[in-house]
Amino acid sequence: MELKELKGMLETTREALESSLDRIHWRAGELVVDYQDFHFKENKERKNWEDKSQISLKTKRRGTSIGIWWVKLKWSGVSGKRQCYTREFKKPRGKFEYDLENVLTEAQNWEKEKIRSVEAEAAQLRLMAAIVSEQLLKIVKNLKKIEKYHGQD
């Protein structure tokens, strides 16, 4: 095997890993939309402000990193001019899933089961994203080594 052949294999692998990250982020976005649809539908059915959910899910991709996190919505201001602020729930460092007790203490009873099921999938997506991202960064580093040693053929 020559460096040129190895470089081609690494580039093919890099493309596959980037495609995997795209699919993981796409699924995370679907998960957020699914939870938001549930959240808005259920909140619409409740008349009292204190019976409505204030829990939300967000996702963002930055480079090879994909974040999926829970937030609590906070409202400020008088009726008609309210502004929404968010407070992130803390996820234990180095873990892929939330300690749901923190989230569930702020949640309404009617949404707790949905939060549990969404978090189970979100944790899997976080783990997959971390693994794919780690491998992608290694591939990119090795491609740079080849280019430095052998040029850009």
Image (cartoon, rainbow, N blue to C red):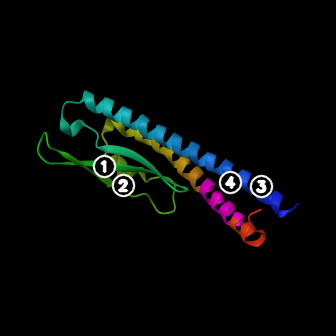
- Give x and y (percent) for residue 53: 29, 39
SS class, disc 4: helix
**Dominant secondary-structure state across the stretch colored magenta:** helix
Residue depicted at x 63% and y 61%:
137
| Residue bearing the label numbered 2 | 89
Q: In this orientation, which residue lies closer to the viewer: 27 or 56?
A: 27
Disc 4 residue type (three-letter): Arg
Q: In this orientation, which residue lies closer to the viewer: 85 or 107?
A: 85
SS class, disc 2: loop
User: Dot 1 surroundings within 10 Å: few (below 14), some, or many (20 or more)?
Assistant: some
| Residue bearing the label numbered 4 | 14
- Give x and y (percent) for residue 14: 68, 54
In this view, the mark in front (2 or 4): 4
| Residue bearing the label numbered 1 | 72
Gap between marks 4 and 3, in whole Å? 10 Å
| Residue bearing the label numbered 3 | 8
- Give x and y (percent) for residue 64: 55, 56
Q: Of the residues under marks 4 and 1, which one precedes in the sequence?
A: 4
**In the displayed structure, does residue 119 sit left or right of residue 11?**
left
Disc 3 residue type (three-letter): Gly
Gap between marks 1 and 3, in whole Å? 46 Å
Quarter of the figure with the C terminus: bottom right
Gap between marks 4 and 1, in whole Å? 37 Å
SS class, disc 3: helix
Residue depicted at x 43% and y 34%:
34
